[in-house]
Amino acid sequence: MKVLVVDDEPQIRRALRTSLEAHGYEVTAVGTGEEGVLGAAEMSPDLILLDLGLPDVDGADVIQRIRAFSDVPIIVVSVREGQHDKVAALDAGADDFVTKPFGMEELLARSRAALRRGGAEEPTPSVMRYGDLTVDLAKRLVTRGDETLHLTPTEYGLLEVLVTNPGKLLTHGWLLRKVWGQGYGTETTYLRTYVRALRKKLGDDASAPGLITTEPGVGYRWVAEPTG
Amino acid sequence: MNVRDLVHPGRRATSAQAVIIALALSTVATALGLLIDRQGDVIGVSFYFLAVVLASAAGGIRAGVIAAVLCSLGFTFFFTAPEYALRVARVQDAVAAVVFLVVGSVVGLLVARMIDERERATERERDARLLGYLATKLLSGEPLDRVLDDFASALIEPFELLRCIVSATTEDGVAEERSIGGAGPAGPTQTLTISIGNVSFGTLTAVRPVGGRVFSDDDRELLEAAAKQAAFALERARLDAQVRGAQLDSETSRLRAALFSSVTHDLRTPLASIKAGVSSLLSDDVAYDPAQRRELLTTVLEETDRMNRLVGNLMDLSKIRAGALVPAREAAAIDEIVDATVARMRPSLTGVVVRLNVRPDLPEVFVDPVQIDQVLTNLLENAAAHSPPGGEVQVAAASFRDAIQVRVADQGDGIPEAERERVFEAFYRGDAAPERPGSGLGLAIAQAVVVAHGGRIWIEGAPGGGTVVVFELPVKVGSA
């Protein structure tokens, strides 16, 4: 697995290189946005870890330029920003956002999740299991234990989008456009209502979530790992 | 004669008016005397006495004396033999005329003086009332322009002014000029300086309309007194401003000193642990067993988190100071923010039991979710830090009138009532627990954020001891 690290801080590059190499990744580290775009094109990495505060090019521009030719998973690794910067990076095409300073465990977990999505050459299995929860994408059937859950079409649409983008931080606007349609994007109140209803039916506690986590002001993330 | 002259007859009548009053009353007395009893000396004399007293009362001393002279002449002319001649046949008539002149003059003098005294007393009382009123206006503590307006308009009526102009120089050298009253062409005008000793604070200009009375000595005296009042008020305002400036300076430098000591102490402490831990691990002298290595590394990790929190708080504080903490508001659900914050913080809240009591059907708030998350994070960190091991931290949210109230309660020792406001000051740590971890910034930042959202935050005592921090956010304010 090849990882491209784009960060202008040599210490961060060194720490990431050491840690990632110890976990078996092949690491290339560069310090500017131009080198980042070039590296993405030339070495076809499996994952890009990108700092937003680069000296030469704005982080969101780097993402857009890479997205012009590649679907490689991009995790933004940046110091604490307001929700607008996060949303801008995610809407530009980033897959996830990890705030500096981060724990290596968290970064590795996010990286694994992103790689799983990126390396999804094999089609998503039609039946997903998360503990006692089963989502049958082919039959559009959701069961919990022996009980079949009755989801409204919108609730099911939302669940489907979430489980097929596991681990990815999905912005409010993206979810609204994906589930409700292109004309939507700002109706976060709808979205909240449906997420709340879905959580209730799936039996997920928002304050100790096992399935869907909330990133206030940004969006939601499906965090459950499939079991079997 | 205008209104004011009628009210002040004793002092205000001119010579011509005095003569007219004396003549009129003497004539009436003569006529009455002649009408009732041509020969009756006594009745004639008594009417003349009445005339002198009335003349004194109505026209003052001068009118009284003139009336006394006229009446004694009238008495001699009409009522003594030979009649219709200014001569007297009898000695006793001559004596009576002289005695009448003296008595009449004295009585007139006394009456006039008595009335005059009373008038002066009334006037003094009124002047005192005016000055007292001015003093309360001037010391009301309202903004300077308002105070000057009130002051100027209070002078208009008693001094019959067309307009009154007060110009004052404020403590920072800015001239403030307030003009109250009508425009119109200026009549008699009086300008005074507002000063104490040789320190000048400005000027007071009183303008009467065209045709108005010239300012008398009394008017000037009273205006001087009013100007003096204004001078005292302006001096006080100047001193107040100086005191405030000094307080601000000392507050700023106190904060800077506290910031400096906090930064050096709170950043160096975790840094020391990190350096000690990592350099130990790098050392070749000792072979640490896995448990010891883990112990050292855990310390490093915890201390890094602590430094990260402090740096975050310091950044927030500097944003607040720079006025850059502008909320990026959007419609948000408080239950969602509470849930997300608690979910994110659970790993670090292991020592306490978190209980949520948040209604899911609360109205939406118009807030910056990240900033409110920050408020909750700070409150939860505080609650956990002050909880006994295994204590319960309760987060409740409910709607209250047009606001959402969020309460974070712990089962710690509580905060004495006297300290409940001070804990929101930056770098304040309770006297009881000066060595508690934390920079003393959490509540200050929480307060700044809540206030920036148009809300309020305060501390309550929990029934069984412990602290409840309550913050209130308006529902959907500015959501249009």
Image (cartoon, coloured by chain):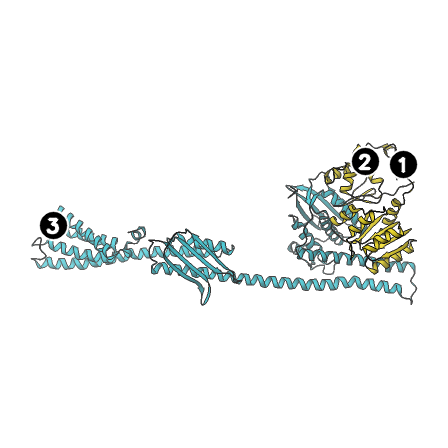
Chain colours: A yellow, B cyan
Rendered position, A203 above or below B392: above
* Residue at horizontal 22 percent and vertical 53 percent from the top: B55
Disc 2, SS: helix
**Picture coordinates of residue A20, whole percent (x, y):** 89, 55
Q: Is residue A97 visible?
A: no
Query: Does residue B184 appear to the left or right of B2 in the view shown?
Result: right
Check if mark 2's residue and mark 3's residue have beta carbons within 8 Å: no
Query: What amino acid is at disc 1?
Result: Val
> What is the C-alpha distance between the residues marked 2 and 1?
15 Å
Spatial CA distance of label 2 from label 3 is: 127 Å
Label 3, on which residue?
B40
Q: Are marks 2 and 1 on the same chain?
A: yes
Residue denoted by label 1: A127
Q: Nearer the viewer, residue B202 or B59?
A: B202
Q: Which amino acid type is marked by label 2?
A: Gly
Q: Nearer the viewer, residue B100 or A73?
A: A73
Q: Secondary structure at mark 1?
A: strand
Q: Residues within 10 Å of mark 3 (few under 14, many from 20)?
A: few
Location of the C terminus of chain B by quadrant is top right
State the residue at coordinates (39%, 59%).
B223
Q: Nearer the viewer, mark 3 or mark 1?
A: 1
Residue A204 position by quadrant: top right
Left or right: residue B4 compared with residue B421: left
Discs 2, 1 touching: Cβ within 8 Å: no
Closer to the camera: disc 2 or disc 3?
A: 2
Q: Which residue is mark 2?
A: A157
Q: Measure how far apart labels 3 and 1 are at the Cα level.
A: 140 Å
Residue A182 position within the rendered picture, expressed as x and y whole percent measured from the top left:
76, 37
Q: Amino acid at mark 3?
A: Gly
Give the letter of the chain under mark 2: A
Q: Quadrant location of residue B403? A: top right
